[in-house]
Amino acid sequence: MNMSYEHYDTVRLNAISISEVARRLGENPRRAGVNQVCTCPWHEDRHPSLTLYERTDENRCHCFACGHGGSVIDFTMQHENWTFQEACRWLSSTFGILVHSGSWQSRQPTPKPAGKPAPQAIQSEYTYIPAEMLENLVSADNSLCQCMMQMFRSEAVENLVMEYQLGTYSMNGQDGYTIFPNIDTQGRICNLKVQHYDTDPESARFSHSDGHCLWLGKMWSKEGRLPAEAEFSSVCLFGEHLVPHYPAQTVALVESPKNALFGALQMPQYLWVATGNKGALKREVLLPLQGRDVIVIPDCDAVDDWAKTIATMADLANFIVSDFCRRKAPADQPKFDIADYIVQQKAETILADCNHP
């Protein structure tokens, strides 16, 4: 079985002059101080309000009128209403950046030589999920996004969907499973985690009645949609693909993708990434954060363990471990996390607004 794929050099694409990209898309950027401005594609903009930053350490845009912005790819997607793949294809073609393409091919077993012992099993190279398989699933129609939309602006949640490439999946006769992609710094999709959440904002929790989290890579291998012998990398942060896009932004490191998403909505001044689980706090997983300023926010029950582990990696990045969740945790919630705190604060704000004359 053959399956084609395209791999885009997202680091180089996001390094293309954003003002030049704007010009190629029909904008007419003009100088405003040390930066340039053009009309914002995120809202109906009659007067140019999108600032284009082109400095040594950044190449991005931000609109002070609507609050949106992002990388070169983000701008291109929004300007043309393109998908991530369409934007990358256009940028690669327009600016002459090589697109790597190929195919996965199921390998036939090699017969064992007669009379010789079987060789030691060698782990195959990792398989990366074709971008097109995720592209068709990216949407805000999943259970977690529907929950977040009850607490945050729908536009903010939809922007988060595109940033993190969140998706929606149906299985076991039920719709609305949330897809959390693990995409590395090179734009390769390492795996796709799926979970179902309660849509009630007061809980916003993983719906355990629908089974534990599943991985689409393994599922699709069993279904024949990917090579049966495929091996998928587990050394990838959720949100890792955004790290090169925001080189000057302080990183907030948490355990679960849900925590990263709630954090990104509530505190967008940080770049939020997640290990995926408590035990994945390992040097090889955190290598993409090398040299960065990183605030580590463990769940209430992981503060001590994570502090000890991070202490062994002081040479990797400028880590600060926060015991915020433990300090804010109610006595009856030993697993209290940053998302729980944000939900709690949102609920208290809504209640106060309702009671205010």
Image (spheres, rainbow, N blue to C red):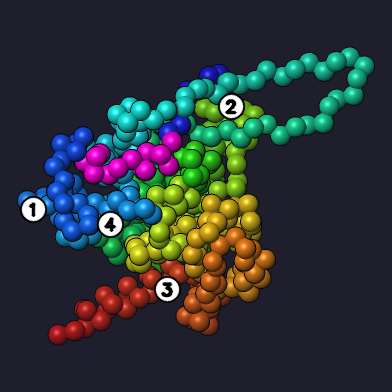
Q: Amino acid at mark 3?
A: Tyr
Residue in the picture at 15% in, 36% down: 26
Give me the residue at 60% from left, 47% from top: 235
Identified by mark 1, the residue type is His
Q: Earlier in the sequence, mark 4 or mark 2?
A: 4
Q: Earlier in the sequence, mark 3 or mark 2?
A: 2
Task: Residue 108 in the image: state x and y as whole percent.
Answer: 68, 17
Instruction: For the residues labelled 4 and 3, say whether their Cβ atoms are less than 8 Å apart.
Output: no
CB contact under 8 Å: marks 1 and 3: no
Whichever of callouts 4 and 1 sits on the residue coming sooner in the sequence is 1
- For marks 1 and 2, give the one nearer the viewer: 1
| Camera-nearest label, 1 or 3 | 1
- The image's mark for residue 341 is 3
x, y percent for residue 88: 35, 34
> Which x, y percent locates residue 14?
36, 43
Residue 101 appears left or right of 110 = left
- Where is mark 1, residue-wise? 47
Question: Mark 2 highlights which residue?
Answer: 227
Which mark is on residue 156? Answer: 4
Between residue 181 and residue 29, name the one nearer to us. 29
What is the C-alpha distance between the residues marked 1 and 2?
A: 52 Å
Q: Nearer the viewer, residue 12 or 108?
A: 12
* Residue 113 image offset from top left, x and y in percent: 85, 15
- Boundaries of the magenta span: 9-22
